[in-house]
Amino acid sequence: MLESDQLRAFLAIVRTGNMLAAARRLGLDHSTVSRRLSALEQALGARLFDRSPRGLAPTGAAVALVPHAEQVESALITAAASVAGRDDEVSGTVRLATPEIFGTCLVAPHIAELSALHPHLTLELAPESRSISLSKREADIAVTLRPPPRGRLIARKLTDYRLGVYGSRAYLDEHGPIGGSAAIGRHGFVSYIDELLDYPEINALDQVALGAPIVFRSSSSAAQQAAVAAGIGLGVLHRLAAESDTRLVRVLADEIVAIRSYWLVLHADLQKTPRIRAVVDFLGQLTERLQPKL
């Protein structure tokens, strides 16, 4: 007979690729996860993973089992949400994945507001430039730069945000005034590392200065801003972060602007869970209130 704990261990191994990472994700020790996998394989009469230099590789039997195990997982999540919904107190942990600037400059500075509303709720914030898989349960909620293409996910547009061209005061003093958008491409720019960028939408350099020479690259938006502030060149930066940086000056504010959007995405199984709803409501109210800064 298959048990839900065995299926949870199986899915964690599939999603992480190795036993140790699966154990960390589940909050268990390595031996417990190994025992549950062995018990599952014995119950099924099939080997589910082959060992390889890269970790544990799913067999054909494992690939066939994944959708069924995920159905069980979804049913358990729905059942837990139904029970939790009967309790007025919002508690537990929510993992939120966001683009770097959104998480560090918008969410983190206002996290005390969420804590005051729901003192028994813990938010885990993962502000990264890479995309996060909600279907693999890497996060409960994600803020993304585009809606998801498919899957049992719910998405809605949170807000638009703007980017502009910035330079340090020292850089602009040294190089003099920039005479219009046609001249801006002659300046060196900071930019992203293309092959490490999961969201091409985040890079607006080609829109504002096509063909401009690149003098520094980073996968981190914050590192790019720091480099621009240090005077290495110009950069297309988030207004949310750059406008409050006194080291920076916006260049050609009336001529150059790039507009992007933030989307809120969550798994359909979690939409009615009180702790998830609390964070979703918080993000919606926060972005609405601070929209002028975006």
Image: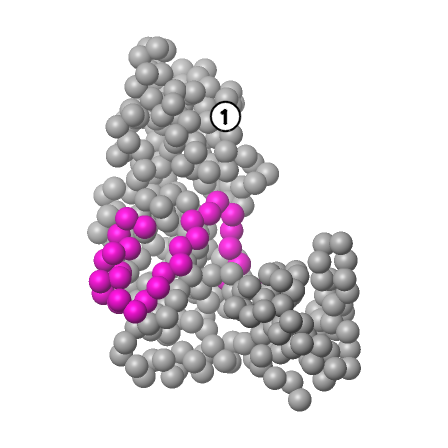
Residue type at mark 1: give it.
Phe
Q: How many marks?
A: 1
Q: Quadrant of the N terminus?
A: bottom right
- Residue 135, position in %: x, y? 54, 64
Q: Quadrant for residue 4, please give it.
A: bottom right
Quick check: 13 above or below 149? below
The foreground one among 109 and 64 is 109
- Residue 136, position in %: x, y? 55, 64
How many C-alpha atoms fall within 10 Å of the one at disc 1: few (<14), some, or many (≥20)?
some
- Residue 170, position in %: x, y? 32, 16
Judged from this view, the residue extending furthest toward the bottom is 1
Q: Which residue is mark 1?
A: 216
In magenta, the rendered stretch is: 108-136
Per the image, is 74 magenta? no
Quick check: 280 above or below 72? above
Side of 250 where 45 appears, left or right:
right
* Circle 1: element type: strand
Q: Is residue 122 visible?
A: yes
Quick check: 148 above or below 199? below
* Residue drawn at point x = 46 percent, y = 67 percent: 267
